[in-house]
Amino acid sequence: MRVLITGITGFVGSHLVEYILANHPQTEISGIKRWRSPKDNIRHLLDKVTLFDCDLRDLGSLIRVFGEVKPDVIFHLAAQSFVSTSYVAPVDTLDCNIIGTANLLEAVRILKLDPVIHICSSSEVYGQVGKEDVPIRETCPLRPVSPYAVSKVGEDMLGYMYWSAYKLRTIRTRMFTHSGPRRGEVFVDSFFAQQLARIERGMQPPAVRVGNLDSVRTFADVRDTVRAYWLLAQKCPPGEVYNIGGDTTMTIREMLDLLLAMTTFKGKIEIKVDPALIRPADVTLQIPCSDKFKAATGWKPVIPYRQTLQDMLDYWREHFARHAPR
């Protein structure tokens, strides 16, 4: 089987490579990256994958790569995925995520390839739901409240349209919050873990900057996430959309308390609300119903969220230890 991963150098992409190599070693893995993409997340995997310089905004480069690889499965993970950044650069976010996805699907159509195509949408498409909508099902109305969420609605609908119009075998996922080692520092639990690791090393004063701590999230581990994505490509019919999420629900404040209990710092750590971290419109209630996906695949999360947090904190500790002045 030939697998191609967009966003292979990213957080989820790197974990997906590790999962495939460990569990399906006969798979040929290729990935596309921009020429300037850092390879830190996959440096230990470079001799096991084939990388191509490519840009989702350049249809010609996609046609070139897809024509050479002829993938059986495409995991489309690449995106401008930072909600806060999307408010600063909305047009760039829409261009990268919507036009980039359209180019990907057009390249497959033009080349007359027939891969399974995983379109990675997001739970952010549901926006701010009411208590009557919880747990959130795939039939919940889409009410995006950030440029990122709008871009993911666009990706989602493009996936559906290309299945309906051209029978490209797209399958869409709306993944809820997922975390783990190598998670970007702009995401809330990784942002807190990074700050605690810096405090432990004396790199910043004993104060954690926070935004809205009252939002409710359901958390999953990225290693459970990539196992779900693999099962999706093997077992789910094209044209469908699936919510996928963990089974640990708590407020951001409760998550921070778990991390604080794991720190080795012995003094008092102050919690400081930073107005810059408050979004113009926030999504404060995200609890998924993953029954449809579980019924189709038999998947369930197995990694406890406390382990996710511990591994993430240890990742940042090791990161700062490696980059400490000598």
Image (spheres, rainbow, N blue to C red):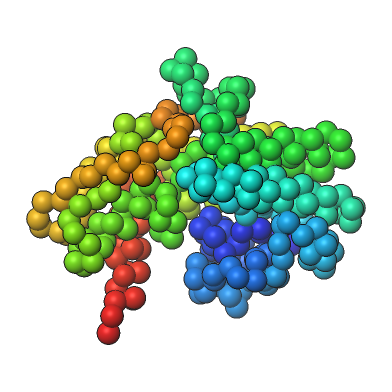
The number of numbered badges drawn on the structure is: 0
The answer to whether residue 93 is above or below residue 60 is above
Farthest residue in the bottom direction? Answer: 326
Residue 36 position, x and y percent, is 60, 70
The answer to whether residue 105 is above or below residue 202 is above
Residue 245 position, x and y percent, is 49, 37
In front of the other: 174 or 89: 89
Residue 310 position, x and y percent, is 30, 54
Q: What residue lies at 61% left-to-right and 59% top-to-bottom?
A: 7
Task: Look at the image and tell me whether residue 86 can be seen.
Answer: yes
Drawn side of residue 14 relative to residue 1, left or right: left
Farthest residue in the top direction? Answer: 132
Q: What residue lies at 82% left-to-right and 43% top-to-bottom?
A: 168
Task: Look at the image and tell me whether residue 28 can be seen.
Answer: no
Q: Quadrant of the N terminus?
A: bottom right
Drawn side of residue 167 relative to residue 233, left or right: right
Picture quadrant of residue 293 = top right
Q: What residue lies at 66% left-to-right and 51% top-to-bottom?
A: 96
Picture quadrant of residue 143 = top right
Q: Quadrant of the C terminus?
A: bottom left
Q: What residue lies at 25% left-to-right and 57% top-to-bottom?
A: 196
Residue 246 position, x and y percent, is 45, 38
